[in-house]
Amino acid sequence: LLAGGQGTRLGFDGPKGMYPDIGLPSKSTLFELVAARILKLMQLATDATHERDAGNNKVVIPWYIMTSPMNDAVTKEYFAKNDYFGLDAANVKFFAQGVLPCLDKDGKIILETAMSCAMAPDGNGGIYT
């Protein structure tokens, strides 16, 4: 799941996946909805394979969540606070996307301070490098 985006355009100071009301009656966040789908898929897959393995194995679907350096900690805290929405914490893996220097339209590095360049997340294309 690509979860590095901030909810700034929504008027929310946090990751979009934590936005408190996306207009559903349940008031569930996107993270909650995806977790519920994974839980349901695991149950369906376990039920479908139950007879073949004599009911000894539970199907596990790991969830990989790409965060950004700006929201990695708050996202992890949110999942821990919500007990990983019923998923086993060992099967929920977080990784932060990389960052690159910011450039102006002429290709010059933008400074954040006099001694450091401004950095920005490299976007979801960064997972392919």
Image (cartoon, grey):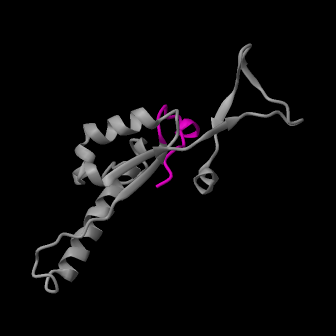
Q: Is the residue 102 above or below the residue 37 in the image?
A: above
Magenta run includes residue 9 = yes
Q: Nearer the viewer, residue 45 or 57?
A: 57
For the point 66% across and 31% down, which residue is it? 119
Q: Is residue 58 above or below residue 111?
A: below
Q: How many marks?
A: 0
Reply above or below: 51 against 25. below
Q: Is residue 3 left or right of residue 24?
A: right
105 in relation to 52, above or below: above
Instruction: Determine the image quadrant of residue 111.
Output: top right
Residue 95 coordinates in the image, percent (x, y): 46, 45
> Residue 51, percent across and down?
13, 85
Q: Is residue 14 left or right of residue 46?
A: right
Residue at the far top in the pictured view:
114
Q: Pick whichever, 31 or 123, lies toward us.
A: 123
Splitting the image into 4 quarters, where does residue 64 fall? bottom left
Q: Is residue 75 magenta?
A: no
Horizontal side, residue 127 vs residue 42: left or right: right
Which residue is depicted at the point 11% across and 74% down?
56
Residue 25 seen in the figure: no
Name the residue at 37% across, 57% down. Answer: 63
Q: Looking at the picture, how far across and down is residue 65, in whole percent?
A: 43, 50
Q: In the displayed image of the protein, which residue is found farthest to the bottom?
A: 52
Q: Main secondary structure of the magenta part?
A: loop
78 sits left or right of 56 in the view:
right
* Stretch of the chain drawn in magenta: 1-15
Q: Nearer the viewer, residue 129 or 108?
A: 129
Does residue 7 appear anywhere in the picture? yes
Question: Looking at the image, which residue is at 53% across and 39% down?
Answer: 6
Task: Give the residue furthest to the front.
Answer: 129
Q: Estimate the x, y position of residue 88 in percent, counting from the top left.
A: 23, 53
